[in-house]
Image (cartoon, rainbow, N blue to C red):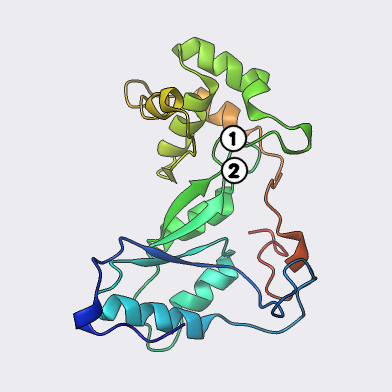
C-alpha cells in the first residue's frame, strides 16, 4: 500500500475502509491455487491506520476475519486504531452466533453480507417454509424478514439490489418486530452453510474458515 497522500492532494475522506481476509497470490495467476505463504496482515493494518491518521479515511475494519485473526489485530503492539467492524457472510443458514458474540464483546460491529442468502447449489432461503410462515404472519416479504432478523441481532445489514421496488421494500423493516419465537425459529435453521468459500485459498494457513469461528 502506498503512503498516505499529502494534504494538498486529499479527496474527501472515505467513510470506511476494510481489510479483507485474503492471502497472497502470484502475479498473473488469478485462478491458480494460492501458495502457502504465512501472512499476519499486521503491516496492512498499520498502513490502514496511517490512512486514518492522514484524514483520508474516517474508520477502518476487516472482512471475513475469524475470531483469532481479529484478536491478532486487537492485540497488535502499539495499536493506534481499532477495527470498527467485521464484515461477514450471515443469514439463517449461517447464523455466526459465536463470531457475532465475540465481535460484539470486543466492541467491533458486525456487517452481514449475503443476508438474503442465495440460490447457490439449489439452496434458496426465500423458499424456506419457516421463513415464509413468519413472513405471512407479519404480512411482509421473506426478504424483509431476513433483514429484520439481522437488525434485531444488532447486526448491520446492507442487502444488495438494483431493483428500485426491492430497494424500497428492503428499508420498510422498521414498522414491525419479530417475536422471540420468530427469532428462535430462524436461529434453528442454522446449517453452518457458507455460500462464499474462496476455494482457491482453502489450503492457505490463514484461510479464515479453517476454524469453527
Residue 213's disc number: none
Residue 32 location (% of width, % of height): 79, 70
Marks 1,2: beta carbons within 8 A = yes
User: Which residue is rendered at x = 43% and y = 88% of the image?
Assistant: 77
Q: Which residue is mark 2?
A: 95
CA–CA distance in space, label 1 to label 2? 7 Å
Residue 116: tell me if it is visible. Answer: yes
Where 167 falls versus 113 (above or below)?
Answer: above
Secondary structure category for the residue under label 2 = loop
Q: Residues within 10 Å of mark 2 (few under 14, many from 20)?
A: many
Displayed quadrant of residue 16: bottom left
Residue 1 location (% of width, % of height): 47, 82
Residue 80: tell me if it is visible. Answer: no
**42 displayed left or right of 189:** left
Q: Which residue is mark 1?
A: 187
Q: Residues within 10 Å of mark 1 (few under 14, many from 20)?
A: some
Where 148 falls versus 72 (above or below)?
Answer: above
User: Which residue is rendered at x = 73% and y = 38% of the image?
Assistant: 120
User: Which residue is rendered at x = 40% and y = 65% of the image?
Assistant: 17
Amino acid at each position: 500500500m502506498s503512503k498516505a497522500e499529502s494534504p494538498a492532494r486529499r479527496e474527501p475522506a472515505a467513510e470506511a475502509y476494510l481489510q479483507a481476509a485474503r492471502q497472497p497470490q502470484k502475479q498473473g495467476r488469478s485462478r491458480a491455487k494460492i501458495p502457502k505463504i504465512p501472512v499476519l496482515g499486521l503491516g496492512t493494518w498499520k498502513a490502514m491506520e496511517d490512512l486514518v491518521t492522514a484524514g483520508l479515511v474516517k474508520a477502518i475494519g476487516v472482512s471475513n476475519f475469524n475470531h483469532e485473526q481479529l484478536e491478532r489485530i486487537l492485540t497488535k503492539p502499539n495499536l493506534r486504531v481499532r477495527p470498527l467492524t467485521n464484515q461477514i457472510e450471515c443469514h439463517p443458514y449461517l447464523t455466526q452466533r459465536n463470531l457475532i458474540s465475540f465481535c460484539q464483546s470486543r466492541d467491533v460491529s458486525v456487517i452481514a453480507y449475503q443476508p438474503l442468502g442465495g440460490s447457490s447449489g439449489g439452496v434458496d432461503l426465500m423458499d424456506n417454509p419457516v421463513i415464509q410462515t413468519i413472513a405471512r404472519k407479519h404480512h411482509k416479504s421473506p426478504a424483509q424478514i431476513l433483514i429484520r432478523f439481522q437488525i434485531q441481532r444488532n447486526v448491520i445489514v446492507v442487502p444488495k439490489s438494483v431493483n428500485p421496488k426491492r430497494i424500497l421494500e428492503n428499508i420498510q423493516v422498521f414498522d414491525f418486530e419479530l417475536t422471540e419465537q420468530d427469532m428462535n425459529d430462524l436461529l434453528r435453521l442454522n446449517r453452518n452453510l457458507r455460500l462464499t468459500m474462496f476455494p482457491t485459498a482453502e489450503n492457505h494457513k490463514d484461510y479464515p474458515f479453517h476454524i469453527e469461528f
